[in-house]
Amino acid sequence: MARNQKILILSDLKSSTPIVLNNAIALAKMIQGDLEFLHVKKPTELVKTESQLSAVRSINESTIIAKKKIKKLLDPLAEKHKTKVNYKYSFGNIKNEIETFVKKSKPDIIVLGKRKSNRLSFVGDNIIDFVLKSHKGAVLVVSHNSNFSPDNDLSIGIFNKDGSGINGSLIKALVQNAISPIKLFKIGSTPENLDQFLSKKAVEYVFEDTTDVISNISSYIPKSRVNLLCLNRTEAFNKNKTIKDIIKRVNVSILII
């Protein structure tokens, strides 16, 4: 029997955390995923003194506070949606701690939020960029105003160059849970290699290949009522159409596969 997909939630425990959790829970329910939650604190946020005894006390106190805060966030959502979420708290270099945990846990999908300012950062350390470079699996980047949740219908948009590479098991599982039609956003011309599974359920939107095409697509997405945009990280975007640019400009959650 195939194992469930492992979904790792990275959180800075800021105000957007419930939205990130709702995205992750919705995804887990649709693909039969197991959820893990990781929060990492910098040592500089914990230790304000040179005294070793005081430092240890500060770390212990901060650990207790952080775990209580995590449980306060997780427990109501987990109970409401009948979903178990295992959590882990650690302190140290954020990127190192994440990398160590990912190597040990081996998640299939990593979920994390982006700042309202649309900066590609997570706790100020460019963690989205770091995760995209270091994790070869899927990454869900959650918009601060996302309405992708277990309580709302899933409406999928797919940003794709030629229709190839979007017929994997993850996309198919989501499409089966989504309302029709699927929206396909294409630059330049109509996809030629579109998988039959998607073509029966999809409406295509073709945009002219201009320097501001990503802005045009991002402004159109809310009108199309899409709440999850999927794209393939192997797409050959030119310098004006990078994944970073799409994440910065598009104000819905983005699943990078």
Image (spheres, rainbow, N blue to C red):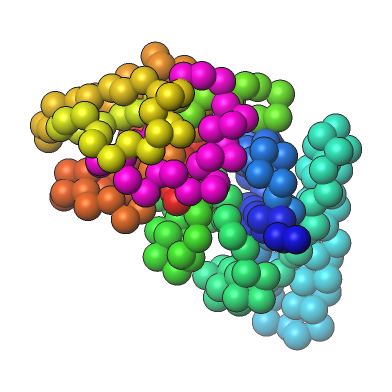
Q: Vertical placement of 3 versus 243: above or below?
A: below
Query: Is residue 111 among the parts visible in the rendering?
Result: yes
Count of marks placed on residues: 0
Residue 155 position in % (x across, y down): 52, 24
Identify the residue shown where x is 59% and y is 40%: 173
Identify the residue shown where x is 48% and y is 65%: 135
Q: Vertical placement of 93 versus 234: above or below?
A: below
Query: Is residue 125 among the parts visible in the rendering?
Result: no
Q: Which residues are magenta?
A: 158-181
In the picture, measured across the screen, residue 220 lies left or right of residue 142, that is left
Q: Residue furthest top?
A: 223
Q: Quadrant of residue 96?
A: bottom right
Q: Reply yes or no: does residue 168 show up in magenta.
A: yes
Identify the residue shown where x is 50% and y is 60%: 137
Q: Quadrant of the N terminus?
A: bottom right
Q: Nearer the viewer, residue 1 or 228?
A: 1
Q: Nearer the viewer, residue 110 or 34?
A: 34
Residue 218 position in % (x across, y down): 32, 27
Residue 162 position in % (x across, y down): 25, 41
Q: Reply yes or no: does residue 196 show up in magenta.
A: no
In the picture, measured across the screen, residue 251 lies left or right of residue 13, that is left
Residue 197 position in % (x across, y down): 46, 34
